[in-house]
Amino acid sequence: MGEKIFLSSPHMSDEGYEMEYIKEAFDTNWIAPLGENVNSFEKELAAKVGAKHAAALTSGTAAIHMALKAVGIGEGDIVFCQSLTFSATANPIIYQNATPVFIDSDYETWNMSPKALEKAFGKYPNVKAVIVVHLYGLSADIDKISEICKKHNVPLIEDAAESLGTYYKGKHTGTFGDYGVFSFNGNKIITTSGGGMLVSNNEEKIKKVRFWATQARDQARHYQHSEIGFNYRMSNVVAGIGRGQLKVLDKRVAKKRYIYEYYKRELSGLDGVDFMPVNEWNQPNCWLSCMMLSGAVRPLDVILALEKENIESRPIWKPMHMQPVFEKYDFISSEYEEVEDMTMQEVAATSENKVSKSQWLFENGVCLPSDTKMSDVELDRVCKIIKGLWNECSDSNKTRV
Ligand SMILES: *Cc1c(COP(=O)(O)O)cnc(C)c1O
């Protein structure tokens, strides 16, 4: 068996930038959730994505939580949330005692369907915020989504946890809405082992978030509190890793895109295989390379065949409206959209008793290993195993006939 190949694992710079910044933190004894690395990481990330202000936090989840608080979400408020995502997008809605309404995806972007969003505004005109996600580094159709939010005068939060390095029409994802969220968890395109960032052009709100995130301490010599606080501030050591990682972000994006192109070239000729959609306005970071299977070989066949060879792969995120913990909340599907020329997926979806699009993507998608440390030899190893499934498949068809 070959060496383990990961889905997406931490990849520190060859130059050792991260250690230099960590060493600086040690040398100056700033081993605290304060210090030069935190301030600089905020400035450097904001500059990289083109946002005016940023607050460095302990996780992307904390950043979503703080965005909801900054928008003023409280008990009983309705929040529209993309259904096809990781649970961390939706959990903070519950932390704020608010009510999520889940919104379906479309096949063109895999992200929030603008048509389903419009439908949701018709049903819930009192909604207080919208959370859109840029899944796997594919950007949502953010012009349409933000236009709809502006029309209804509702704030937009972008969960860009997976899309650092992704541009939509030349502008960085996470900077279109009122708030943008990034994550530096261990599996993300760059990592600090764990961490997150909230960006916004609203300086006052970002200052407020820093205040809430450091236990909401009022300006006083003694410990004085007039609001409930959180312990959400990023540490100065962790921020040092982030500063180093930010220097190699472009390299990581280039490698992720190379991996995506490699798979696409090698595998898209196979029967029933389709790759995640890259639109002309989308410059994705290709955080994970995902393919869709609508033929005889199923996602689980691929996952098990790779697992046997010590290679990690995953299904697509299971939509939130299908999760036991969120089942009781409403879901607005895009299944009845009128489509002129139906794609392969749509034909399959209509013939399968009209499952929602997010469900179809979940049931038919696989995330292929997309680790930036992979060599061509390893990429080839993965492709050979996958291609082998199609050979088996056609062999067994022959024997059946
Ligand atoms: C990773 C991730 C998050 C959460 O980020 P953490 O830093 O792990 O808390 C949120 N949303 C999406 C879509 C993610 O992939």
Image (tube, rainbow, N blue to C red):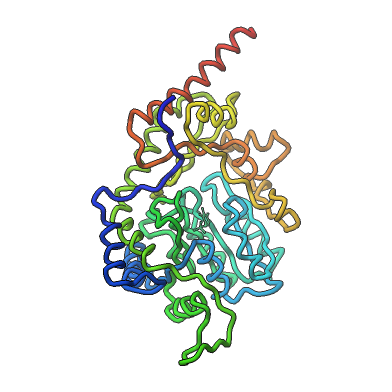
Above or below for 136 versus 213? above
Quadrant the C terminus occupies: top right
Name the residue located 51 percent from the left edge and 39 percent from the top edge: 367
Residue 167 left/right relative to 392: left
Above or below for 25 versus 13? below
> Which one is in front, 295 or 12?
12
Residue 124 in picture, x, y percent from top left: 70, 66
Q: Is residue 142 visible?
A: yes
Residue 233 in picture, x, y percent from top left: 46, 71
Name the residue located 55 percent from the left edge and 11 percent from the top edge: 395
Q: How many marks?
A: 0
Residue 317 in picture, x, y percent from top left: 58, 46
Q: Residue furthest left?
A: 15
> Which one is in front, 342 or 67?
67
Q: Residue furthest bottom?
A: 221
Residue 112 left/right relative to 326: left
Above or below for 342 versus 252? above
Q: Is residue 167 visible?
A: no
Residue 67 in picture, x, y percent from top left: 53, 70
Quadrant the N terminus occupies: top left
Residue 229 left/right relative to 20: right
Name the residue located 65 percent from the left edge and 37 percent from the top edge: 349
Name the residue located 58 percent from the left edge and 48 percent from the top edge: 106
